Image (tube, rainbow, N blue to C red):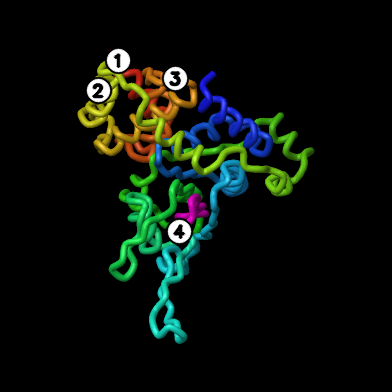
Amino acid sequence: MSPIKETLDNIVVQMSQVILGKELQIRLVLTGLMARGHVLIEDVPGVGKTILAHVLARVLGLSFQRIQFTSDLLPADIIGVSIYDKEVGQFKFHVGPIFSQMVLADEVNRATPKTQSALLEAMGEHQVTVEGETRLLPEPFFVLATQNPLHQIGTFPLPESQLDRFMMRLALGYPNHQTERALLKGRDRREMIADLEPIVTVQDILDIQNAVPQVHVAEALIDYLQAILEHSRQSPRYRVGLSPRAGLAILHCAQAWAVMQGRDYVVPEDVQMVLPGVIGHRLAAMAEQQNTQALVNQLLEEVAIP
């Protein structure tokens, strides 16, 4: 077993003690972090989205800030603001919660589009520009956002440009019968978070992130990925095809998933594993009623592995 795989397995085990029955989702969130992306979790309130974020930050030992998105939240509340300091006779910049290694953007679609857009530069370039000055964000920098289903009252749809900044979109879903019974009979989840200790250092995380691009990708795998992209653009089933950025996201996530499996090369199964999370918010079918998994299954059936 590779040292990185052993480390990641330990992280999953620790998190799974609090987040019951969601090992796949935990691994996919870690995949997004390892690939230097950001993750959006869309689901109904009360299924554990916020607790997952707290547990992840605690186990990884990252500096953590939670931003509660509401309709009256302003961009300055996220980025920061300059305040005049009488003692020195000049304005002093007070950093906002975005200057953390991990940021939970909670219920991100309850804020207005103007406020949502305050995250764009930070997520895309790991920096923010305030009053003409560019300020770098800490490394690693990871945004885990949650949003409620769009049919719920008081939500603003995320613009496509904002959605595209998220490398993956996931759903937790309701627990199964056995898991829910364990939740009902067990300790309070928030009390359990307080008992968790970091099991990796920030440098360990950076080392893992640096290892992901070194994972070998064969020419035949690139052919497979390009065939998926081209099919999405040419098929009459889809309104808009996958962009080059989507292709890079699939590739980087597949490399990260391979690392999690203890391999230094990518296989087609890695691509298929991460595909639902990467393209679900990017690929729209002509038939509105089709769900994400059906779309992905259709795409995989129609594109042969070289």
Residue at image mark 4: 98
Q: Nearer the viewer, mark 4 or mark 1?
A: 4
Marked residue nearer the N-terminal end (4 or 1): 4
Q: Say whether marks 3 and 4 touch (CB < 8 Å).
A: no
Please say whether residue 2 is visible from this viewpoint.
yes
Mark 3 residue element: loop
Please say whether residue 291 is visible from this viewpoint.
no
Marked residue nearer the N-terminal end (3 or 2): 2
Residue at image mark 1: 304
Q: Say whether marks 3 and 2 touch (CB < 8 Å).
A: no
Image location of residue 224, percent across then percent down: 28, 20
Q: Nearer the viewer, mark 4 or mark 2?
A: 4
Inspect the image, locate mark 3, and give the three-letter code of the amino acid beneath it. Arg
Q: Nearer the viewer, mark 3 or mark 4?
A: 3
Mark 2 residue element: helix
- Residue stretch in magenta: 100-110
Image location of residue 36, percent across then percent down: 40, 40
Image location of residue 150, percent across then percent down: 45, 50
Q: Nearer the viewer, mark 3 or mark 1?
A: 3
Residue at image mark 3: 263
Marked residue nearer the N-terminal end (4 or 2): 4
Residue at image mark 2: 227
Cα separation between marks 1 and 2: 8 Å
Marked residue nearer the N-terminal end (3 or 4): 4
Image location of residue 120, percent across then percent down: 35, 54
Point 45% across, 70% down: residue: 94
Q: Nearer the viewer, mark 3 or mark 2?
A: 3
Check residue 108 for magenta coloring: yes
Point 40% across, 41% down: residue: 37
Inspect the image, locate mark 1, and give the three-letter code of the amino acid beneath it. Ala
